[in-house]
Image (cartoon, grey):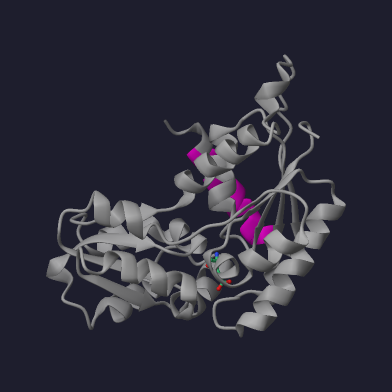
Amino acid sequence: MNSSPIGVFDSGIGGITVLAKAIKLLPEEKFIYFGDSANAPYGIKEADSVIYLTLKAADFLLQKGIKALVVACNTATSVAIETLRISLGIPIIGMEPALKPAVETGRGGTVVVMATPLTLKEKKFKSLMEMYSSKTNIIALPCPGLVELIESGVWEGSQIKRYLSERFSGLNTNEVTDIVLGCTHYIFIKDQIIELFNSKIRVIDGNEGTVRQLRRVLASKGLYKQDMQSPLFDQSLPEFYFSSSKDKVLNLCKQWMEKQINSR
Ligand code: DGL
């Protein structure tokens, strides 16, 4: 079982940002990625549809013999994580907007959480808000349409710039000190967000925390490959599956991923 792959799932390409971190921090593990690109975006759908699609995706990965599943999608996690945990007999690691580290290590200004409309509407995010909104000013900023742009490979240029300036136009941006990326797709445009604020803000995401949690869970269940004390390191590349053709943008993602893995 230890040598079985780990499944990573998202509505599309966003979870590849989590996969990159996972390969970097757990290089001995093997990964299988599934992006439900035929049904993206999830963030403007009804919760029930997202639960149904997430269970279907998890089943696809289970058939591939995965030992654990990373739901590399804040939207799917917020509506489907409990159902997944009840239905699947393997460890499930989910994601949530990294509001905790943003507030606890923040610089005291306004924290903006960018996420899909569904993530921000759900109970999970509401309880996060309840926990942290007394400590600092938090603005939840739904970003409909942004996942679609990123899925189509638009990560920079005037279209993204226009989208971001329109989205932030109603806010007092001078007071913003921290931005939480509550959707894994948005990490592909992190530099554009930083540029919009003239590098004066900090941008935080939950990817590293999620991978650390994955490592903890694997270790606690005796599923961590390193525990095998085997000299065999699995250097094989991750397998990628999508529910619709993604060739062009997948190449872009692989280049991005390589850069992240090789960066220090
Ligand atoms: N990457 C997903 C997330 O983290 C995007 C959801 C969508 O497809 O709208 O929320």
Q: Position of residue 210 (x, y in %)?
A: 51, 48
Residue closest to the eye, 165 or 141: 141
Residue at point 66%, 23% (across, down): 226
Whether residue 243 is visible to the viewer of this picture, yes or no, is no
**Residue 68 seen anywhere in this rendered image of the structure:** yes
**241 lies left or right of 111:** right
At x 16%, y 53%, the residue is 107
Q: Position of residue 99 (x, y in %)?
A: 35, 60
Image: 159 above or below 9: below
Q: Quadrant of the N terminus?
A: top right
- Decide which of 221, 117 is in the foreground and name it: 221
Q: Which residues are magenta?
A: 247-260
* Residue in the picture at 62% in, 32% down: 219
Q: Is residue 201 above or below residue 77?
A: above
Q: Nearer the viewer, residue 120 or 242?
A: 120
Decide if residue 3 is on the left or right side of residue 39: right
Q: Residue at x 76, y 40 (%)?
A: 5
- Where is residue 132? Give x, y as percent: 28, 64
> Where's residue 214, x and y in %?
58, 42
Total marks in image: 0
Asked whether 61 falls inside the magenta stretch, the response is: no
Q: Residue 57 is drawn in which quadrant?
A: bottom right
Q: Residue furthest right?
A: 63
Chief secondary structure of the magenta span? helix
Ligand 1, image quadrant it occupies: bottom right
Q: Is residue 175 left or right of residue 178?
A: left
Q: Looking at the figure, which quarter contains the C terminus?
A: top left
